[in-house]
Image: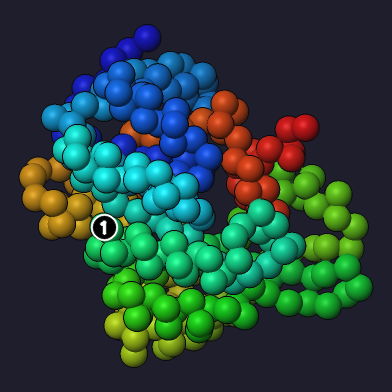
Amino acid sequence: MTTRQPAPIIISASRRTDIPAFYMEWFMQSIKRGAFEVANPYNQKRSRVIATPDHVHTIVFWSKDFRCFIDKAYGEALKRLGYHLFFNFTVNSESSWLEPNIAPLAERFETLSRLCERFGPECINWRFDPVCFFTLPGGEATHNFQDFREIAAVMRELGIKRCITSFMDHYGKIKKRLSKHPGFFFLDPPMEKKVRILERMAEQLTPMGISLATCCEKEVMAQLPENSSIRTSECISGRLLTALFGGNLSLQKDTGQRVKQGCGCTRAWDIGSYKLQPCRHNCLFCYANPSKDTK
């Protein structure tokens, strides 16, 4: 087993599962031990990631449900230990098809408000992700934009300034998952439509003081006008984290992410596990391994 001790580092918790919603007790136990034991999801090689406050610049949490995180005051406990915290909060339109186990939108707004109050809106990215087009059983073609304007208005009111989005990737595991839902089909819109969608989103967000960035959409970005306000996202941005919290961070890109597809993230150590910590949201478009896929 290797020991990784770069200092300072960014811990990502996590792209692979929803730790704030389901695994914070495990997370805090690892923090107490001062390290995470992490298995590479591709080759299963195990590494030990030192996680003491003197080695960690920022912990970046990714979630669709921060209720448990807030109710049990995990964030306050981490701050008392000396950690800086940043949040990628995915808030999509309500859809029992796409996100069957997600809290109602009103509850997510309440959670978001509490997160802003405790940690500041400047420490939160809003992810509207992914943009989905699909056909329901019966033939109705639709999408998940219906609540976008309402969500954006709440973000503006709370002072959140960044929106990150992407279009759904059509992975093989998703197609397999759809076999359990006869008559439901995801659609992949043509490039021209994707460009129009992003431009329309930016037109709505810009007057609200919210910037729009895309996650891993290099091909779509290449089709935007040169003067477009839409930028490539850094869901984990070393520049932003040092501006917020000071200190020094390497701005090296995270080569473990989809750099060729346009990922702009700064290098971070992801401590989650698809296999050991399956996400129970069971989102229909998920690229990971939702629990219902493994039953």
The residue drawn where x is 53% and y is 26% is 42
Is 94 in front, or is 273? 94
Q: Who is closer to the viewer here, 224 or 63?
A: 63
| Along the viewing direction, whichever of 83 and 289 lies nearer the viewer | 83
Q: In which quarter of the image is the C terminus?
A: top right
Tally the marks.
1
Q: Which residue is drawn at 43% across and 58% down?
A: 89
Instruction: State the residue at coordinates (27%, 45%).
Output: 76
Q: Mark 1 points at which residue?
A: 119
Going by the numbered disc 1, the residue's amino acid type is Phe
Q: Of all residues shown, which one is farthest toward the top? A: 1
The spot of residue 263 in percent (x, y) is 39, 53
- Tell me: residue 228, above or below residue 115: below
Taking the image as shown, residue 255 lies to the left or right of residue 249, namely right
- Residue 280's image quarter? top right
Where residue 110 appears, x then y in whole percent? 45, 67
x 45%, y 52%: residue:
66
Residue 223 percent across, percent down from the top left: 46, 75
